[in-house]
Image (cartoon, grey):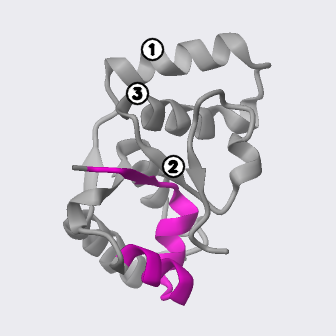
Amino acid sequence: MTRYLLDANIVIYASLGWPAVLDRLSAHAIGDVAISSLTYSELLVGPTSPVGGGVRHDERMALIAESLDILPYDRAAAEAYGRIARRLAFNRRLVLDRMIAAHALSLGLTLVTNNAADFADVPGLRVENWAA
């Protein structure tokens, strides 16, 4: 059963071979870790992402899609986002992060990110940093 939802930066660090992230990933069963379909969309951007574009990027994204469950953003996640957005001040820069936080909350998952500060104001969200 999935226990962790990875933010894009953690997936990028894993694809680049960061030892701390790879150690944490290897400590969990494959089904314990997933990404949001929102995160997958963010990762597919390509040339503007830190992973870089081109064939190598496409190969990394194909490997991610084969290796991790990609969870659909559903009605429960949308409703969780609505609750978060009503409770917190609107910030356009944080919309995607808050949607990913809502996805984690709706599924009872711990969000894994290297940007914990961007999620610190989301009530009830469990956050871990595997890159530290």
Of 30 and 95, the residue lying toward us: 30
Residues shaded magenta: 2-25
Res 18 visible: no
For image coordinates 56% across by 43% down, the residue present is 126
In this rendering, which labeled residue sits more in front, label 2 or label 1? 2
Q: Which residue is mark 2?
A: 111
For image coordinates 42% across by 49% down, the residue present is 41
Vertical order, 92 against 12 (above or below): above
Residue 17: percent from left, percent from top: 48, 88
Label 1 CA crowd tier, 10 Å (few <14, some 14–19, many 20+): some
| 2 or 1: tag closer to the N-terminus | 1
Residue 67: percent from left, percent from top: 23, 69
For image coordinates 58% across by 36% down, the residue present is 125
Mark number displayed over residue 79: 1
Q: Which residue is mark 3?
A: 106
**Distance between the alpha carbons at the discs numbered 1 and 3:** 8 Å
**Distance between the alpha carbons at the discs numbered 3 and 2:** 12 Å
Q: Quadrant of residue 96?
A: top right
